[in-house]
Image: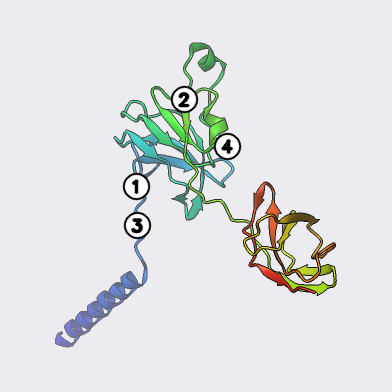
Amino acid sequence: MKKRTKFYALLLAMVLSLTQMIGAAVPVKAATKECSHGYTLVNGIGIRMHECGESVCITCYHGHSKRVVIPKTFKLNGKTLPPSQFDSDNGFSENGVKEIVLPDTVSSMGYWDEEDVEDGNIGFRGITFYVHKGSKAEKAVKRHNPYKYLKDNTKPQPVKGTTIKRAVRIEKLAKLKWKKVKCDKYEIRYSQKKNMKKSKKVTCGKNKTSLVIKKLKKNRKYYVQVRTKAGKKYSAWSKVKTISKR
């Protein structure tokens, strides 16, 4: 009888140990928060998967902020997706929201049929939207909703400049050669003064990398610089290169 009791006690200990090992090996999946409408809740915003499966829809709002900034992406069903649509004004106006900042990816502001249009039940009541000029979001809100433009904080990219590789003097001529870069045009200026006062300018096409300057005065030293042009913008002038006198 004692042997049988020890056997069952040992078997029970093995079962408990195995159960603990299995429990430790299987991670517990974090519960997804849902709003009162049954949608996934992220920072007070209810979202659902869009029919296309490549974006999310904003379904409702359960917070109480006056200014709501819609995130550029949401995590849903293991994917990181941008918002593309508002289903309706469900909770935004009634919860006191006055401003909504939209990411550029939002292209639709809800489903409205002809009856809604006739009754005037369109748009978000008392809310001003903030969008980037020229974005999908601007096009989506401008039909029925008041909006303002967000400031574009992106810094303009400087135009890439170039450098003069050689400046060879041959009597009254000077042959220049510069490094080729991606641009629309090259502009060359040259002068007898290092500060480039009273300089003369020559423009070359984007495929040229050399230029012959003619009618230089004998026994006079010249200075030359080059810069690039892309669109309406110019790069900085290159370092001054000396053309020796002859």
> Residue 226 is drawn in which quadrant?
bottom right
Mark 1 or mark 4: which comes first in sequence? 1
Marks 3 and 1 sit apart, C-alpha to C-alpha, by 9 Å
In the picture of the structure, the residue carrying the numbered disc 3 is 30
Q: Nearer the viewer, residue 28 or 186?
A: 186
Mark 2 falls on what kind of element? Answer: loop
The residue to which callout 1 is attached is 33
Distance from Cα at disc 4 to Cα at disc 2: 15 Å
Q: Is residue 227 above or below residue 142?
A: below
Q: Is residue 38 left or right of residue 105?
A: left
Q: CA distance from mark 2 to mark 3?
A: 40 Å
**Callout 1 secondary element:** loop
Residue 118 as seen in the image, left or right of residue 183: left
Tell me how far mark 4 sits from mark 3, CA to CA.
35 Å
Q: Earlier in the sequence, mark 4 or mark 2?
A: 4
The answer to whether 80 is drawn above or below residue 165 in the figure is above
Mark 3 is surrounded, within 10 Å at the Cα level, by few (under 14), some (14 to 19) or many (20 or more) other residues, namely few
Q: Residue 1, how many percent across, how many down?
A: 15, 84
